[in-house]
């Protein structure tokens, strides 16, 4: 269900629910994923991984080297000194000492179950896995792993990495100002509580995968990889192997979901490229599901201790938070969003004082990576705290939010986290979500149900989300080319991972150029033909690719119009382009098809005035504002079965504002996908470990990803307040995963609170919920 009635400005394509161009290919099984790449003589890689979380190791690979079909076997001793430059992502080169250590394979010791120890290269994956059986690994000095914040921060020399003493990856703080401290301490009510979020992960359909081929005689590196960022892959491969960037070509093809996991180049992928270079061969590695669940990357294991000061009239005067992030043994960049959790903690509220501290620790677990809205703990902690505080103070949570929420009239708002929030509609989406979910009616029904011993609850979450416009994200390229037949190619610097950029880009180009959408082909993910770009991440392709493609198309349209003006002997300003024809406004008979203009540009250049720029090829770099914001309110209602602890989601409503929608279908698909991941996170998914550091969820039998059956209908509503970017588009891709967890958690907490039960932790599996219920109603 959706309500997209606010499409006053919808064009022929932009704003329309155009069917996705990529779907016929994907839905008929004709997508081309990395594992589909098969090269002559291609070798296969298999990693032998640690079964122990923390130990010294002694490795004997002699039998494996002699095994059938084995071409080479590498240990850390063979490989770790072969990295020519660095394995770190471009944005962290030079800052390696502040990041997790990064090297190809385990050396003398292992740091988590799944740590890659040996790489076997064989003629087939089966032979490589057979050879793994005869690799001998002795685990010596097995010691208790560091698993949690307290052990990690105990300061007793119990270090996960000897060269990272104290187990702290990152520690930052902006303490409360004196004024803020006075406001907090002087508030009529001060409420403190801790909220935790458990470890869950991205789980793409296609696990990580790479095919790397080094041609020593051509000095050419070809890499096919499942990635969100082809140009970054090229840089990383170049730095790690020493092959110059212009000798490396990266192609990403179709990507079966990235969700942040594929933003950066992982350790195993770099190892495969390194080994392909050393062997002068083509090598393929496709991560299997077990590897993906235990050793690719995890996310979300975080804790926030929050204190809120509230005046008697319900005004929030100050918030203080201590944030802790368990980022495992080898955190990928982005796996620790600590500072952003602190800076964003006041979120969509008119709060003037904030103090925050954030500590990210190493543990003997799988490292973390960015996951759709990597900083979303700020929303989880804040929104759970808002409802908890309301309950403590006897306030209605909706009215408490309304008292403090930012509305259009409050903007721009200089947040105490140091950001300027603008072009957002938190109050407006809150009102819309409350109305659509029928808040008042639900409260009446809930009171009746509670009296009957039923467990009904309603919860909200409101967030504002920044889209980055700094560092590598400060600009975005677009290359638009019109061919002699009038058809157009658009080349993007990004690498789509499933979010529909082929369609939305074609919509923008066709709309701006006034041509048919079927005459536009979008190219991305090949470093040889596309302009350098920062890849897909941070929900910025709506605003930034949207802007870049529109600007490039405007420049191209101006060229087309200038040539048409010459052909029609008219003034350019009198011309318009629509439906593939350039015509004089008001005199449609005086016209020339775009195709004829393009033909003239290429084939009649001698007859065109020399000052006319007839090169129908526009390479454009578009500058981003420092930050762009989008926002949404999520609302959920649930009923809990007190006999089993099972949670049924009755309704899930999203009121979102991603500015003007390029494609409402795609926007809603993005919201639905993110919400499904949020629901999975709260109710089903858990990368759980035992106390010895053994991962207990290593198959889909134990790691429960929700299916369509578990996901309710998601009712999506829109408010379209434009951004300051050209086109006014704002990001939407991550929002579902940011807002859904807290809204669902709050609904469950509300249902339990009606019966005097408090819940503060996730996951909310039936066992946990039932135990809570039995504590008060045995
Ligand atoms: N869009 C639109 N109108 C807007 C804004 C966006 O039509 N006003 C469209 C865009 O053109 C794009 C899609 O919506 O096709 C998402 O755009 P945007 O919000 O800008 O997000 P990105 O394209 O930058 O995608 C990144 C974001 C992130 S960070 C993750 S992680 C993510 C995601 O979106 N992972 C995904 N969506 C995913 N969707 C799929 N299918 N698979 C993933 O791995």
Image (tube, rainbow, N blue to C red):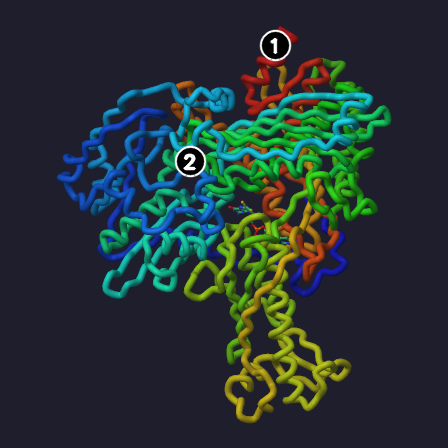
| Number of residues whose C-alpha sits closer than 10 Å to that of mark 1, classed few (under 14), some (14–19) or many (20 or more) | some
Residue 89 shown left or right of residue 271 in the figure: right
Q: Quadrant of residue 542?
A: bottom right
Which residue was labeled with disc 2?
330
Tell me what residue is drawn at x 82 percent, y 21 percent: 188
Residue 666 at least partly seen: no
Side of 118 relative to 480 (left or right): left
Residue 102's label in the rendered image is none
Position above or below: 219 against 144: below
User: Farthest residue in the left direction?
Assistant: 66
The label nearer to you, 2 versus 1, is 2
Q: Earlier in the sequence, mark 2 or mark 1?
A: 2
The answer to whether residue 504 is above or below residue 97 is below
Percent x, y for residue 657?
Answer: 71, 47
CA separation in Å, label 2 and label 1:
40 Å
Q: Which residue is denoted by mark 1 in the rendering?
A: 774
């Amino acid at each position: 269900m959706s309500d997209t009635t606010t499409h006053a400005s919808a064009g022929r394509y932009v704003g329309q629910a155009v069917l996705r161009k990529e779907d016929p290919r994907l839905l008929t099984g004709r997508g081309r994923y990395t594992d589909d790449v098969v090269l002559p003589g291609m070798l296969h890689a298999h990693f032998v991984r640690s079964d122990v979380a923390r130990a010294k190791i002694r490795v004997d690979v002699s039998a494996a080297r002699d095994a059938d079909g084995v071409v080479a076997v590498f240990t850390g001793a063979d490989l770790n000194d072969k990295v020519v430059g660095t394995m770190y992502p471009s944005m962290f080169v030079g800052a390696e000492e502040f990041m997790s250590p990064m090297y190809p394979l385990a050396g003398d010791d292992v740091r988590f179950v799944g740590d890659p120890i040996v790489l076997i290269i064989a003629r087939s994956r089966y032979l490589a896995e057979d050879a793994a059986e005869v690799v001998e690994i002795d685990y010596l000095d097995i010691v208790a792993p560091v698993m949690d914040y307290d052990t990690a921060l105990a300061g007793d020399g119990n270090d996960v990495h000897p060269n990272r003493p104290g187990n702290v990856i990152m520690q930052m703080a902006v303490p409360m100002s004196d004024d803020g401290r006075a406001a907090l301490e002087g508030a009529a009510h001060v409420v403190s509580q801790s909220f935790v979020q458990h470890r869950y992960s991205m789980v793409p359909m296609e696990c990580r995968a790479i095919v790397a081929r080094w041609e020593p005689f051509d000095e050419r590196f070809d890499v096919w990889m499942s990635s969100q960022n082809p140009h970054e892959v090229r840089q990383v491969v170049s730095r790690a192997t020493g092959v110059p960037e212009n000798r490396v070509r990266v192609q990403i093809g179709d990507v079966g979901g990235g969700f942040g996991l594929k933003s950066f180049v992982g350790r195993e992928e770099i190892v495969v490229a390194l080994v392909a270079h050393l062997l002068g061969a083509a090598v393929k590695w496709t991560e299997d599901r077990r590897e993906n669940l235990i050793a690719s990357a995890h996310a979300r294991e975080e804790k926030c201790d929050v204190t809120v000061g509230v005046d008697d009239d319900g005004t929030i005067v100050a918030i203080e938070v201590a944030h802790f992030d368990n980022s495992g043994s080898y955190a990928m960049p982005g796996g620790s969003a600590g500072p952003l959790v602190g800076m964003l903690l006041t979120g969509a509220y008119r709060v003037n004082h904030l103090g925050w501290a954030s500590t990210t620790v190493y543990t003997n677990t799988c490292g973390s990576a960015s996951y759709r809205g990597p900083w979303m703990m700020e929303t989880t902690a804040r929104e759970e705290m808002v409802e908890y505080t309301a309950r403590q103070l006897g306030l209605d949570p909706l009215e408490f939010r309304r008292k403090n929420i930012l509305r259009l009239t409050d903007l721009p708002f200089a947040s105490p986290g140091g950001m300027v929030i603008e072009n957002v509609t938190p109050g407006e989406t809150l009102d819309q979500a409350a109305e659509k979910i029928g808040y008042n009616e639900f409260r009446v029904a809930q009171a009746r149900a509670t009296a009957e011993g039923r467990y009904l609850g309603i919860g909200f979450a409101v967030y504002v989300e920044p889209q980055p416009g700094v560092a590598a994200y400060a600009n975005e390229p677009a290359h638009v080319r019109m061919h002699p037949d009038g058809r157009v190619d658009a080349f993007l610097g990004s690498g789509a991972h499933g979010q529909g950029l082929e369609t939305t880009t074609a919509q923008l180009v066709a709309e701006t150029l006034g041509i048919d959408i079927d005459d536009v082909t979008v190219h991305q993910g090949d470093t040889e033909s596309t302009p350098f770009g920062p890849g897909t991440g941070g929900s910025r392709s709506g605003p930034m690719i949207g802007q870049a493609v529109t600007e490039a198309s405007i420049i191209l349209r101006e060229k087309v119009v200038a040539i048409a003006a010459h052909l029609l002997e008219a003034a350019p300003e009198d011309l318009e382009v629509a439906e593939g024809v350039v015509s004089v406004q008001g005199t449609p008979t005086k016209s020339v098809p775009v195709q004829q203009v393009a033909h003239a540009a290429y084939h009649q250049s001698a007859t065109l005035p020399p000052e006319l720029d007839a090169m129908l090829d526009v390479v454009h770099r578009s500058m981003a504002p420092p930050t762009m914001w989008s926002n949404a309110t999520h609302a959920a209602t649930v009923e809990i079965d007190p006999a089993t602890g099972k949670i049924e989601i009755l309704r899930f409503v999203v009121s979102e504002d991603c500015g003007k929608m390029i494609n409402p279908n795609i926007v809603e698909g993005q919201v639905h996908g993110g919400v499904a991941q949020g629901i999975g996170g709260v109710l089903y998914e858990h990368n759980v470990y035992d106390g010895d550091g053994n991962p207990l969820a290593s198959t889909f039998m134990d790691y429960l990803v929700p299916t369509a059956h578990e996901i309710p209908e998601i009712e999506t509503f829109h408010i379209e307040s434009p951004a300051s970017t050209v086109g006014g588009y704002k990001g939407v891709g991550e929002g579902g995963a940011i807002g859904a967890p807290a809204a669902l958690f709050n609904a469950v907490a509300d249902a339990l609170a009606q019966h005097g039960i408090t819940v503060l932790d996730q996951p909310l599996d039936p066992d946990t919920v039932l135990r809570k219920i039995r504590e008060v109603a045995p």
